[in-house]
Image: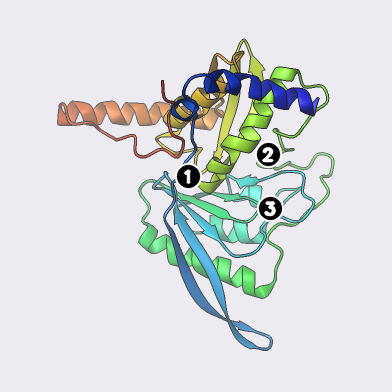
Amino acid sequence: MSSARHSGIVRKDAKANQNNPEARRPTLQPLHQPSTILRPAAAAGGSRTIFIQTENTPNPDALKFLPNQRVLPEGLSTPFIEYMSPRSTLAPPHPSPLAANLMNIDGITSVFYGVDFITVTKAADANWAHIKPEVFSLITEAVTSGQQMVNITEHKPGEQHHEGAEEDSLAYNENDSEVVGMIKELLETRIRPAIQEDGGDIDFKGFEGGNVLLKLRGACRTCDSSTVTLKNGIEGMLMHYIEEVKGVVQVLDQEEEVALAEFAKFEEKLKQQKGSVPASTEGKDSLDSVPG
C-alpha cells in the first residue's frame, strides 16, 4: 500500500517534470517572525535561564509560544489538542492545568497544543500588550515547576468528553483507498509542516465526490485568510499532484459558521459606512499559490 501511495503521487509530478519542473512545482513557505524571551527562573540548585520563543502567525489574534521542551506527552496518539472553553481544559481524557490557567486570562478564547508548541488565541478586541505578559508568566511557571502540561485520564461512562483531541486523521489506515492514501501522504509530508509552523494543524475529514474535506485547527482555524490558504495553497497543491482531486471544502463547527456569518454582516456594515474603502484585507498567507 505504501509503495502504491508513493508512486501515485510521483505519477502526477512526473507529468509536470516533462516540461518545466521548477516553474510548476508548488512551494510551501511558513510565515513566522520569531523572537526569544529569556526569563531567569528559580530552580532547586540555584537559578537558571528559561528560553521561551514566540512567533507571530498569519492570524493577528494568535501567537505561537515554544517553551523549548515537549508539550504533548510521549506516546500520545493525537498530534495536537485544542481547548475551546475553560470546561474543556478539565474534561478527560486530556485535562491540562496550564490550559486551564491560560483560559482564565481575560480575552483568551482558545489554547492549542502541538507536539512542542503552544498557540494562544485571543478575542479580536483584546490587547496583546495586556495578555502576553500573563501568558509568559504562566508558561514559565509550568516549565520551571516541572508540572506535566497535559494529563491523561480515563474517560468514564456518562462523563463529558473533550472533543479537541482526536486520533491522527492523517495516520495510515489499511481501509483507505489508493487516492485517500495519496491525499493523506501529501497532507502529512508537504502541507502539515507549514500549517504547524504557523501555529496550527489540519484534520482530514474525508474524500467525497472529488472534494477533500478538511478542518483547520489552532491559529489557522480563526484566521481571516483561512479560505485563501485552503483554496490557493492546499487545494492547488492537491489538485496539482492528484488528478482525482477536484477541490477542497472547509469543514466548520456550528459555532464557526455563526461567527463567520456575524463577521460577514460586520464587514458589510463597515462597507456601507465607509463607501468603497475595503473593510478588511486578506493578509499574507503561509501557503503559496500554485503557478499556472
Nearer mark to the viewer, of 2 and 3:
2
Determine the secondary structure under disc 1: loop
Does residue 123 lie above or below 127 as drawn?
above
Q: Residues within 10 Å of mark 1 (few under 14, many from 20)?
A: some
Give the vertical position of 23 relative to 246 (above or below).
below
Q: Report whether residue 270 is seen.
A: yes
Give the residue at mark 1: 30
Which type of secondary structure does the marked residue at label 2 adopt? loop
Q: Residues within 10 Å of mark 3 (few under 14, many from 20)?
A: some
Query: Which marked residue is nearer to the observer: mark 2 or mark 1?
Result: 1
Among the 4 quarters of the image, the one containing residue 167: top right
Quadrant location, the C terminus: top left
Residue occupying the far left of the picture? 275
In the rendered structure, find residue 163 and report the number of the disc placed on it.
Answer: 2
Task: Answer few, some or many: residues within 10 Å of disc 2's Cα (few below 14, many 20 plus, some between 14 and 19).
Answer: some
Nearest to the observer: residue 68 or residue 126: 68
Q: Picture coordinates of residue 237 (x, y %)?
A: 53, 26
Q: Measuring 70% from the left and 33% from the top, which residue is drawn there?
A: 170
Residue 172: x percent and y percent? 77, 31
Amino acid beneath label 3: Leu
Q: Amino acid at mark 2?
A: Glu
Pinpoint residue 174: horizontal percent, then vertical percent: 83, 25
Q: Earlier in the sequence, mark 2 or mark 3?
A: 3
Q: Position of residue 33 (x, y in %)?
A: 41, 55
Q: What sort of colour scheme is used for the picture?
A: rainbow
The answer to whether the residues at label 1 and label 3 have Cβ atoms under 8 Å apart is no
Measure how far apart labels 1 and 3 are at the Cα level: 32 Å
First of labels 1, 3 by sequence position: 1
Q: Which residue is mark 3?
A: 90
Q: Closer to the camera, 251 or 214?
A: 214
Which image quarter holds the N terminus? top right
What's the amino acid at mark 1?
Answer: Pro
